[in-house]
Image (spheres, coloured by chain):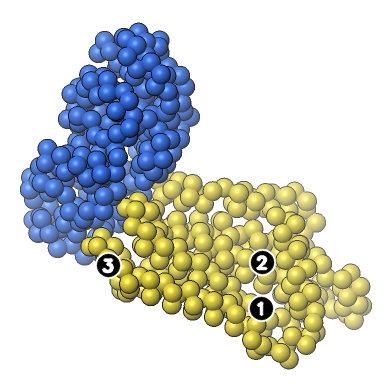
Amino acid sequence: MTIITETQVLATVSATDVSSIRDRFWTWKRFVTPLIVVVVLGGLLAWVSSLQLDSIEARTLNWPYIVLRVKEHLLLAVSASALVAVLAIPIGTLLAKTKSKVLKGVVLTLANIGQATPAVGVVILLAIIWQTGFTTALTALVIYAFLPVLRNTMIGIQQVDASVRESARGMGMTPLQVLFRIELPLAVPVILAGLRTALVFAVGVATIATFINAGGLGDMIVNGLKLQRYPVLAVGAVLVACIALLIDWVASLAEDFLTPRGV
Amino acid sequence: MNKRILPIVAVAAAGMLALTACSSADTVSGSQGTELEGLTGDIGAKDFSEQFILAHITSQLLNAHGADTEANTKLVGSANVRQALENDEFIGYWEYTGTSWITYNGNTGPVQGTEAQFEATKDADAANGIAWLNPAPLNNTYAFAIRAEKAKELGVKTLSDIAALPMSEQTFCIESEFSTRDDGWPGLKAAYGLDIPDSNVALLDTGVIYTATQKGDDCNFGEVFQTDGRIPALDLVVMEDDAQFFPAYQGAFTLSQATLDEYPEIAEIIDLISPLLTTEQMQKLNALVDVEGEDPEDVATDWLTEQGLI
């Protein structure tokens, strides 16, 4: 995991190092992802429209059903990512600042376990010992997507050049000022890269919400799979993939907008 | 709390045991005859206890007649098991008439009547090169179960009784799959004149439904399978399907026609056990695995020995 996050760090930093990127923000390359998504969805729509749906397929392959599932899916994935941001960034900051190796070790181990444990297992276990529904699915997603944001926050803060930190202190800034005015702004690109990873994770893993009455596109995937209705399965799976691509694209825009100038 | 947790732990433990109980060669080969000499391969199973037990029973029985087979309980999902049979990876496995009729043969509505459903399925699968041997009486169809005490409190015995309940009590836990089948939720609502809003319906995974039904937080009525051993174990009672809405999911051994042509004796040998496998018998055997935590292979051996078949 460390290796992955550090490559992400490098990638983000090198991409944002090129300051000219801001001048050429809306290049044609920006539109490749949405274009692919539109083409794929158009193809999917054309294919499904050409099919003679039986009554089982017609109960899922209709607009109200699909729109509802997409909404549920987005709500789950986005609120899980937001919760992860709210929780993991402060904790990551604290961990980066703390001198206690034990605390660091414990929190990182917990986050690692959260990601390493199969999310399906977590969600079913939570449903049995706690309750079913949205809150449980949300909890499982947060547990699962916690690590990349936590890790990247820590790395983002730690990678700030010691000389920058020292000159800030030399200018008379308090440690808190150094944190909020120097370290955190400089860590933004790395933290955002982690958040982007978490978002994509959340979109994919939200498919398991179907097992515990929390809806989402997993309903279509499981339904199509169990009843061998491949159009249903294909629509569910392709929609999840398209949402993941689109969300990643929106996050990349946000990343470029939010990265402070000069970084 | 402990009372609630205990059966869950038991079921979970049983599940783990079932998972670890994979294939192994069993029993004395050829103790009952040698007519199947030369038949080697795997007996397939879907991913639940009843199927594990049936696969072991079949494998051990065939081996007692000279075959060299193993129960393969590693696949997940009906469709995958059927696919494996079509690809000749299995000698055969136990299938249910309704499953093949609706899922593999793409029909949307069931055929009325257990026998008619069997004949229709057998004919449809003959075109696919899959042969159905004589069916067992067991009918692993859908059913709705409720906590025994709650059933008493509400005074419900049949599915028809449900429509008269206050709307707040008409709550259901069903699988995603069941929610869209003609022989599932839409058909059931129509058959019993139920007018239930989606907010009263919780979509859950099969395994979660049993515990959710026992807890009673999500729903009063949970969609279960008739032969499941957890129904008595979790103190659930099944609502009588008084309008006879649910199609028959009668169990029978399926195998490729080519295998049957080569070893026609298989049919007579399977006929030794088929009539004995009733819904009640299957519930008992399933409970041994799901509730008592016994190994499906041991359950199969014990049962066959009891019946004097191996």
Residue B88 placement, left or right of A156: left
- The chain containing the residue under callout 3 comes to A
**Residue for badge 2:** A194
Amino acid type at circle 1 is: Glu
Q: Earlier in the sequence, mark 2 or mark 3?
A: 3
Residue B36 at x, y percent in the picture: 34, 17
Q: Earlier in the sequence, mark 1 or mark 3?
A: 3
Q: Which mark is residue A255?
A: 1
Q: Are marks 2 and 3 in contact (CB under 8 Å)?
A: no
Q: Are marks 1 and 2 in contact (CB under 8 Å)?
A: no
Amino acid type at circle 3 is: Gln
| Other residues around mark 1 within 10 Å, as few (<14) / some (14–19) / many (≥20) | many
Image colour assigned to chain A = yellow
| Other residues around mark 3 within 10 Å, as few (<14) / some (14–19) / many (≥20) | few
Image colour assigned to chain B = blue
Residue found at x 40% / y 36% = B88
Residue A258 visible at all: no
Q: Which mark is residue A154?
A: none
Q: Which mark is residue A52?
A: 3
Task: Quadrant for residue B238, please give it.
Answer: top left
Residue B29 visible at all: yes
Marks 1, 2 in one chain: yes
Distance between the Cα atoms at labels 1 and 3?
A: 44 Å
Distance between the Cα atoms at labels 2 and 3?
A: 44 Å
